[in-house]
Amino acid sequence: MHMADALLSPAVGGVMIAASAAAAGYSVHKVVKDPDFKQKIPAMGVMGAFVFAAQMINFTIPGTCSSGHLCGGLLLTAILGPYAGFLSMIGVLLIQCLFFADGGLLAIGANVWNMAFYGCFVGSLIWSAFMKKGVSKARIILACVIGSVVTLQMGAFSVTLETLLSGVTELPFGTFLGAMLPIHLAIGFVEGLITAAVLCFVHQVRPTLLWNVENAGEEARFSYKKTLAVLTCAFLLIGGGLSLLASSYPDGLEWSIEKLTGDTELEGEETGVYETASRVQESTSFLPDYAFKNSESAAGTTVSGVVGCLVTFGVLAGAGALMKIKGRKKTA
Amino acid sequence: MNRLDDALNTVQRMEHGKRELPFSCVHPLALFLTAAVFLVLLTSIPKNRLDLVLAMGVWVYLYALLGKMSIGEILKKLWALFALLFLVGIANPFLDRKVLFSLGTIPITSGMISMLVLFLKGALALIFASFLASSAGMAGILSALSMLHLPPVLINVIYLIYRYLSLMLREASLVWTAYRLRAPGQKGIHFGTWGSLVGMMLIRSMDRAARLYQSMELRGYRPQTAFVTRGRFDQKSLLYLAVCLATLLLVRFVPVFSFIGSFMVD
């Protein structure tokens, strides 16, 4: 997500430098006031260098043939706290930009904002919210995955906004956003899992290293029932309620096709394999275009949202159970 | 060679192989200010002014010749930079089809030019930032930042990250090599060992850093006074800054290529 200088105009780059400098100034003020300031300095240095080195190691993404790496904002926050973590991340970004040609010097403000500000400050709010009632492996995993996904999405959104405000691309806002957000959703999820794996290990081996954690040595109780209840409510709210507010405009791909052909959908050939595939799809899709068959009712969208969430959950739970059985067979 | 070894080599080259370049004797603040002005002027060029970007390119080439710096080595790193530039710029030729002129039978559109300008701007900015790093070095850049009143805490943190970098990269490289030897042909580190492998590296590094910092303190290291500004801003540095700024403003605001062209075409 490192932005190059060419993607920014001097005005946007200057504003982002000013905003990041203000956040850095406030962080310096808070870090200096910290009673553990003296002990924190070497930790900040080594954590910055650690994040830099960890970004060079690629991790296998399960189920795919690719690999990803750590970004580090949330990891720094979970160990050092938001202010010290933010300053360490600035150091990492500056060294990357000057000596490794990763990101630009004028774009340093934007990169600090997109990666360090969200990762450390928004990440710290999410981390604190999960750790408020004690620490457990499940809470660490949830905090890391949600924190990484949210902060990376915010960062990707900012990249889009800053590039468009700089006027260097002809891409419409929606199309650019459509290209940036989904890929960073996947990256955020993987980063969250890697961060969670590292922090779970730290919690197991040396729990006092974790920031803002009450009763670090004790394992908090994790309720699967409560978590399932929260997830179910979220499914119903998003799938059943918020789906009604979804934009009726075409998505990025449909928009492009419409520009080229004048219609959002392409007419396929009505012969051979196309016809067979079309017939199979017609018979299996019980909620075509996210609505009841031959009905314009809004309830169709709500039902589609809920059913979609439940089916996805069922498929993932089934896949998880299969993997568990396979793992048990292997160890046996 | 993997990315870790590559980064380790770069850091080692920076630490041990530092050579004296013609511009190394210039005060770091002058180098830093020149780089900052260059970047602002470069990025302020409108998206269709290919002539101005090319003039900036000629300026960078002459600067590299005078400073005995290699552009080729920096260009090898460009692949990483072009990922986002490509995503942003590739749509321009398709969305902006206004024909500006024709090269033979090939129509050159406004979108093609803006894409080329974007790529050139990215490459030139990267090249000049690398020039700054190689002629001023880390200590010089931090000295310039200190003169620009960046908080000492931040400067010390950046300096410590830089100092610990080679230690950490070496440690990571050893761990990674050991892992690869035990898991040949595997792409990346298996998710079952993500936590223990990186977590152990982190805990060991933190212990080591604490010991290292204690020994630094015992030898008299104090964060508040550790970083003193280097040298005096002498006349040579002032001259360098004046010449660079004047020529930069000239190539940015005077269309040099159009001016030369006007002599050739009536």
Image (tube, coloured by chain):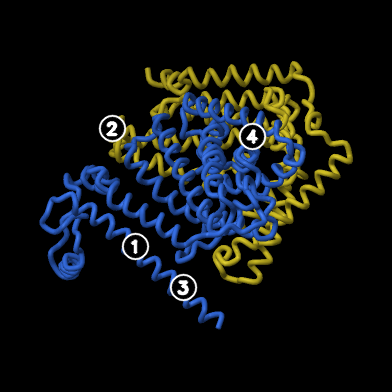
Chain colours: A blue, B yellow
| Mark number displayed over residue A300 | none
Going by the numbered disc 2, the residue's amino acid type is Val
Going by the numbered disc 4, the residue's amino acid type is Phe
Q: CA distance from mark 2 to mark 1?
A: 49 Å
Look at the image and tell me in which quarter the C terminus of chain B lies: top left
Going by the numbered disc 3, the residue's amino acid type is Met
Q: Are the two marked residues, 1 and 3, in contact with CB atoms closer than 8 angstroms? A: no
Q: Residues within 10 Å of mark 2 (few under 14, many from 20)?
A: few
Going by the numbered disc 1, the residue's amino acid type is Thr
Q: CA distance from mark 3 to mark 2?
A: 57 Å
| Mark number displayed over residue B131 | 4
- Chain letter for mark 2, please: B
- Chain letter for mark 3, please: A
Q: Return the disc, 1 or 3, that comes first in the chain's sequence.
A: 1
Q: CA distance from mark 4 to mark 3?
A: 52 Å
Q: Is residue B76 visible?
A: no
Q: Is residue A96 left or right of residue A15?
A: right
Picture residue at 52% right of the left edge, 27% below the top: B56
Q: Name the spot of residue A29 as percent of width and height, x first.
A: 66, 28
Q: Which structural element holds mark 1? A: helix
**Residue receiving disc 2:** B99
Mark 4 or mark 1, whichever is nearer to me: 1
Q: CA distance from mark 2 to mark 4?
A: 37 Å
Specify whether disc 1 shares its chain with disc 3: yes
Specify whether disc 4 shares its chain with disc 1: no
Q: Residues within 10 Å of mark 4 (few under 14, many from 20)?
A: many
